[in-house]
Image: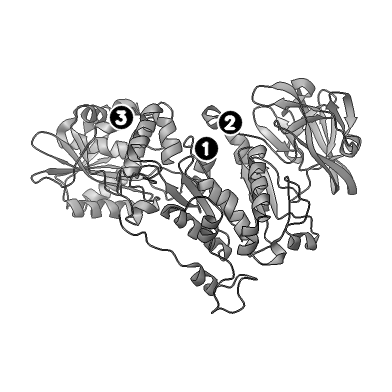
Amino acid sequence: MLTPPRQPSVVEIFQAELVKGLLQDPNEKPKVPSLVEFFNKTTTFKAEWWQEWIANRLQRLLVEKGQRILLHAMPQAGKSILVSNRFPAYVLGCDPLHRIRLACYGQEHAEHFSRDLLSLMQDDVYKECFPNPQCRLPRVNRVEEWSTVARVALRDAQPSFKPLGLGSGFTGLGVDCLPAGTLVETEDGPVDIRDLHLMAEKPRVWACDIYSGKPDLRSIVASREVQAEALVEVRTEGGRRLRCTPDHRVFVQGVGYLPASELTVGAPLVGYLHHPDSLESVEACAAGPVAVYDLQVAEHCNFYASGLLVHNCLIIDDPYKNAEEAHSEVINGIIWRWWTDVVKPRLRPETNVVVCFHRWCQDDFAGKLEQDGDWEKIRFPALCDGGEDDPTFVEGIRKEGESLSPSRYPVDFLVREYKDRNPESWYSLYQGTPIAPGGNWFQVDRILPYDTIPEGLVIYQGWDLAFTQKSYSDYTACVTIGVDEDANAYILHVLRERWTPAQVKQGVLDMAKAWKPAVIGIESQGWQSQVFKDVVSEGLFPFLECKVKNRDKQLRAQLLRTRIETGKVLANKSAPWWSAFQEELLAFPLGKHDDQVDAAVWALTVAGLETEWAIL
């Protein structure tokens, strides 16, 4: 196996831009170890090269700002211990004034990392690695949030580390609370929220499992008092009156939690013990400093205030308990609203964000972030699949089919895992490339491999056109095939781009010149017809205008499906385009895109292997 290429060393990084407190002089060696060295000193195993790759990428965040990173690796591979455990401790050792928020699928899971970090940072090995006394911790720390002594000295109410359940608010970044006089439903009856905050032994409060609608008694795990500058009053058709800060979130049936100021008349709210109610109005009712109170409620992360179901203020716990919930439009909507309405507006331009993910479906949280653009996607699939987002393939470390961690997870083990799981689970958790539920309409494993292109093939091309460069739109796709004398179709090349109209025309001509096909089929519907006319006017290549007779995409794709099932399709599975082509085949017909499938069918059609569609 090749020696993995090295990223810039920690010395080179720190020399490029000094990090506060690390160097006295640009020519000195760093006072602290690299993240890889710190990882190896504080774990019982040595980082594998791909973990070193991640560590070096994270290391650069000490001098880079405004980075957005999406990171995938298979379960139990050691990604979390590096990213969610060692990296926060390392950052605080280098910069004791840094602030870190760690959001996991549930508050309990996030607090597990918090406990581990507290233990690690109080260990003698940590103190040896980071001699700066400013990164030490006070004698007493709360797992819910804690700070270095340097951060405590600032007295700005901003903790160094805060564990969060995915979907929670960011404590201290905005006010999200209720005033004294607000009655909270408890096991002992209604109690003023101020009194609950002051009680040493707090009663359980009535909460609600928003997924089942079942009311439940849950414990108060924390509370606080802060000052707010404004209050609004929420009035309902059922006569309920709730005073709260404008950004306090209220549960809306079928939508999720919305800030009180964004509620609209008629919005379906949830009353005590899940009785239905609806919004009558929201009006400003107070201005100036006023004491307000905030509760953290275990598990369901909500409670009934003034008879209405409201958000926990800090946490929505465990949004992805399983794959079924990950496919839920309601739950995904809640998480996405948390990101767009709560987190994103509070991020400064220089803030770095790292999202470690297991993909459950194409439209889950990580999928939406990827579509949103400006994210650096880094994917370490369990078995190399030739993806351009896999550094092991791009940098020549792995060939297709090789394991990410051969000593821990050999290929035969991963193959058994694949056979024991459904395809959706395997591709989501192990490969980071989810396919739609009910996928595998194409039997992709029946596509035969080839290494070299045979002589004597007749070349054909098929095009599916789209005119836009927007990240969420369809692609322009071209599939080039070669057909031998036995009617076997060799997939020679697949192109997929988001182009402007001018780029589409030039791309069609460039691909024709590159492959010199006998026939080129271009789907021509409405606005696509102009491109067809433009390329035909060049008079250089044999173009055929293709029109769809049947709008059922599965019926249209039957030609490709049949030929795959009968072993008449071959592909170069080490080609850089194979991963995206395979992913689309696996997701069909429920995937987001089918451009490559359509282009492949047009190529087979103009090759004379199909008579169902009209070719004019």
**Front-lying residue, 165 or 247:** 165
SS for tag 1?
loop
Give the image location of residue 210, x and y in percent: 67, 27
Quarter assignment of residue 251 = top right
Q: Is residue 69 visible?
A: yes
Give the image location of residue 380, x and y in percent: 42, 47
Q: Which residue is mark 1?
A: 364
Distance from disc 2 to disc 3, alpha carbons, whole Å, reads 30 Å
Q: Quarter of the image containing the N terminus?
A: bottom left
SS for tag 3?
loop
Image side of residue 591 versus residue 301, left or right: left
Give the image location of residue 331, x and y in percent: 60, 32
Q: Which residue is mark 3?
A: 442
Q: Decide: is 451 above or below 4.
A: above
Q: Quarter of the image containing the C terminus?
A: top left
Q: Is residue 548 visible?
A: no
What residue do we see at 78% from left, 63% from top? 154
Q: Decide: is 84 above or below 276.
A: below
What residue do we see at 78% from left, 43% from top? 176
In primary-sequence order, the first of circles 3 and 1 is 1
Q: Residues within 10 Å of mark 2 (few under 14, many from 20)?
A: few
**Front-lying residue, 110 or 582:** 110
In primary-sequence order, the first of circles 2 and 3 is 2
- Look at label 2 and name its amino acid: Lys
Point out which mark residue 75 bears: none
Q: Which residue is mark 2?
A: 321
- Look at label 3 and name its amino acid: Phe
Distance from disc 3 to disc 1, alpha carbons, whole Å, reads 23 Å
- Look at label 1 and name its amino acid: Asp
**Front-lying residue, 68 or 489:** 68
Quarter assignment of residue 179 = top right
